[in-house]
Image (cartoon, helix red, strand yellow):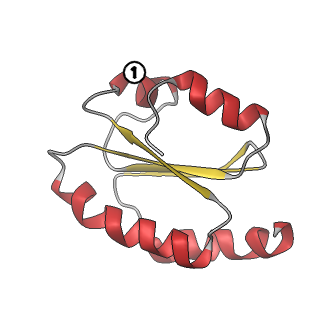
Amino acid sequence: MQIQSLSEIDKLKEEGVSFFIYFSAANCGVCQVLKPKLISMMAEKYAKIKACQVDTALHPDIAAQLGFYTNPSFVVYLDGQEYMRRSRSISLQEIDERLERPYKLMF
């Protein structure tokens, strides 16, 4: 799901949805390499966490209002509450390790 406005994020949080947002831009080489790996891992291991994306070249205001000023960035909300955030150097292994236990407890 492509996020177009901050109100879409607010609505997901209010509804208590578990979701993650990947912030990237087309001109970011690291973003383009990391994106398919991250999306694949999340779809395979954490399928009940909804996938969202923000193109920071088109919507820098959304990233800035959430406190992200660099690409790539990643944030996870569990039941509408922020659980973790990472920017710049994102480790798939760290994300996997941090999400495994709460995911099993919730789902």
* Count of picture labels: 1
Horizontal and vertical percent position of residue 52? 50, 48
Query: Of residues 36 and 98, which is closer to you in this image?
Result: 36
Horizontal and vertical percent position of residue 72? 33, 50
Let me know if residue 68 appears in the view.
yes
Q: Which residue in the rendered view is the most extreme toward the right? A: 105
Query: Of residues 54 and 66, which is closer to you in this image?
Result: 54
Q: Quadrant of residue 37?
A: bottom left
Residue under the image location 43 percent in, 41 percent down: 2
Q: Amino acid at mark 1?
A: Asp
Above or below — where is 46 with respect to 8?
below
Q: Quadrant of residue 104?
A: bottom right
For residue 10, side relative to residue 35 (left or right): right
Q: Which residue in the rendered view is the most extreme toward the front? A: 1
Residue under the image location 62 percent in, 71 percent down: 46
Q: Give the SS element for disc 1.
A: helix
Residue under the image location 28 percent in, 28 percent down: 58
Residue under the image location 48 percent in, 46 percent down: 1
Let me know if residue 76 appears in the view.
no
Quarter of the image with the C terminus is bottom right
Horizontal and vertical percent position of residue 33? 24, 66
Q: Residues within 10 Å of mark 1 (few under 14, many from 20)?
A: some
Horizontal and vertical percent position of residue 16? 79, 42
For residue 32, side relative to residue 38 (left or right): left
Give the residue pinned by disc 1: 61
For residue 17, side relative to residue 71 (left or right): right
Above or below — where is 73 with respect to 98?
above
